[in-house]
Image (cartoon, rainbow, N blue to C red):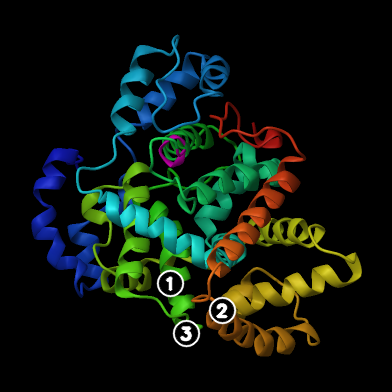
């Protein structure tokens, strides 16, 4: 079946909007064939970069491209320059006021969001077979500290105060990630260990997307964190813009939280389950998290219990996260009390500033730990996992 152009699909978006309301899985699959669509703009760019052997030089040139408003460096291949200049443009529907409000929401709720997006989203992602396989067999799977550090660059930039401001870096991180996704699609098909279809489809990106904002908002509601309608919409909006910047077609991006919840319920369950690779990645991730706390004899059981609390028994069992009879009931009892206590403080003067300072310090500490104090940038890979190349 010939793939529709982006322009054709955008023209169809009005008709597709009704499907986002309460669609059946069968109807949605027929109308929105996202499971067989990738990124027709980025894919040929990364393939050409890899096939022509210029990726190391491109990575060197893009190393210091770090700000949203920063001109591209000289020396890039023309086709890459043209792609980035187009890809770095935020969509016309992006609302600056909502993006600024989202930054303030992230500022006051950073503790929860970092925990949910980092630990919770990480555990959910390792229980998604296609994502676990893509990570494990690509270059990043051989050095998970580096892989997590580079993934965190994008996640933290979405939640930063400057995210989409001219002096922020979310556009840069998203465009680089989009090129990495395209490179992984090209490289993994050359791996003798890769036995599945082309990875990182539009659906795959949305599946991962729902382990971040949709999952986080559901947990915040479950924890009874008070959130205004304006803040809720702003938080959704910053992630809608980010989905667009990652190459997701606009007509596939949920327009409301109701649509997001419906779409999440449709795409997450059939795409989740246990894999050997997911279990191994989970163990590495939780081991990294445990190293950030002390004493060591306490940290891993505590981390296991926290992870199980965040994602529940089914995902935890798929990921083979050990049960911790001592810590699990303590966390289940203490965390809701901590949320209530913290939310009681939020309206007081200076508390949001103090909370943001602590959350920002935690982000920087995590990045410092993961990168071993090395300067880290998102780079286009040139190989698969070493033993699979």
Mark 2 or mark 1, which is nearer to you? 2
* Disc number for residue 345: 2
Check disc 3 and report the residue beneath it: 224
Q: Residues within 10 Å of mark 2 (few under 14, many from 20)?
A: few
Q: In front here: 26 or 90? A: 90
Number of numbered discs: 3
Mark 3 or mark 1, which is nearer to you? 3
On-image quarter of the C terminus: top right
Is 175 magenta? The answer is no
Q: Identify the element where label 1 is drawn.
A: helix
Q: CA distance from mark 3 to mark 2?
A: 15 Å
Q: Is residue 342 above or below residue 92?
A: below
On-image quarter of the N terminus: top left
Label the magenta part by its dominant secondary structure.
Answer: helix
Residue at x 66%, y 72% (from the top left corner)? 307
Q: Identify the element where label 2 is drawn.
A: helix
Q: For the magenta stretch, what is the residue range? A: 168-172
Asked which quadrant contains residue 286, the reply is bottom right
Residue 305's spot in the image, x, y percent? 72, 77
Q: Residues within 10 Å of mark 3 (few under 14, many from 20)?
A: few
Q: Is residue 235 above or below residue 42?
A: below
Q: CA distance from mark 3 to mark 1?
A: 10 Å
Residue at x 52%, y 53% (from the top left corner)? 131
Check disc 1 and report the residue beneath it: 217
Visible residue check, residue 123:
no
Q: Identify the element where label 3 is drawn.
A: loop
Q: Is residue 360 above or below residue 60?
A: below
Going by the picture, which residue comes out furthest to the top? 75
Asked which quadrant contains residue 90, the reply is top left
Residue 240's spot in the image, x, y percent? 32, 55
């Amino acid at each position: 079946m010939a793939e529709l152009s982006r322009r054709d699909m955008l023209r169809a978006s009005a008709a597709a909007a009704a499907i986002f309301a309460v669609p059946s899985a069968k109807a949605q699959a027929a109308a929105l064939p996202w499971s067989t669509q990738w990124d027709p703009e980025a894919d040929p760019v990364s393939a050409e970069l890899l096939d022509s052997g210029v990726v190391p030089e491109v990575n060197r040139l893009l190393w210091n491209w770090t700000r949203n408003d920063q001109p591209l460096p000289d020396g890039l291949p023309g086709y890459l320059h043209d792609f980035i200049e187009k890809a770095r443009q935020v969509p016309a529907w992006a609302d600056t006021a909502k993006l600024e409000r989202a930054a303030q929401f992230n500022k006051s709720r950073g503790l929860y969001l970092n925990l949910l997006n980092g630990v919770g989203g990480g555990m959910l992602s390792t229980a998604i077979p296609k994502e676990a396989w893509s990570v494990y067999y690509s270059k990043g799977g051989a050095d998970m500290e580096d892989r997590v550090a580079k993934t965190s660059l994008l996640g933290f930039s979405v939640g930063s105060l400057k995210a989409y401001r001219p002096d922020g870096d979310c556009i840069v991180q998203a465009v680089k990630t989009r090129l990495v996704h395209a490179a992984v699609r090209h490289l993994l098909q050359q791996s003798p260990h890769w036995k599945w279809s082309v990875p990182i489809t539009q659906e795959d990106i949305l599946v991962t997307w729902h382990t971040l904002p949709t999952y986080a908002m559901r947990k915040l509601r479950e924890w009874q964190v008070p959130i205004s309608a304006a803040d809720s919409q702003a938080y959704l909006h910053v992630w809608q813009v980010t989905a667009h910047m990652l190459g997701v077609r606009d007509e596939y991006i949920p327009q409301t939280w109701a649509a997001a919840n419906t779409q999440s319920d449709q795409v997450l369950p059939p795409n989740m389950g246990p894999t050997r690779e997911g279990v191994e990645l989970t163990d590495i991730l939780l081991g990294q998290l445990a190293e950030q706390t002390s004493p060591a004899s306490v940290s891993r059981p505590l981390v296991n219990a926290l992870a199980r609390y965040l994602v529940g028994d089914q995902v935890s069992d798929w990921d083979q996260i050990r049960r911790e009879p001592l810590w699990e009931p303590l966390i289940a009892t203490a965390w809701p009390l901590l949320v209530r206590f913290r939310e009681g403080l939020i309206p007081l003067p200076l508390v949001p500033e103090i909370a943001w300072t602590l959350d920002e310090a935690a982000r920087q500490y995590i990045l410092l730990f993961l990168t071993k104090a090395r300067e880290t940038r998102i780079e286009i890979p040139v190989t698969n996992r070493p033993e699979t190349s």
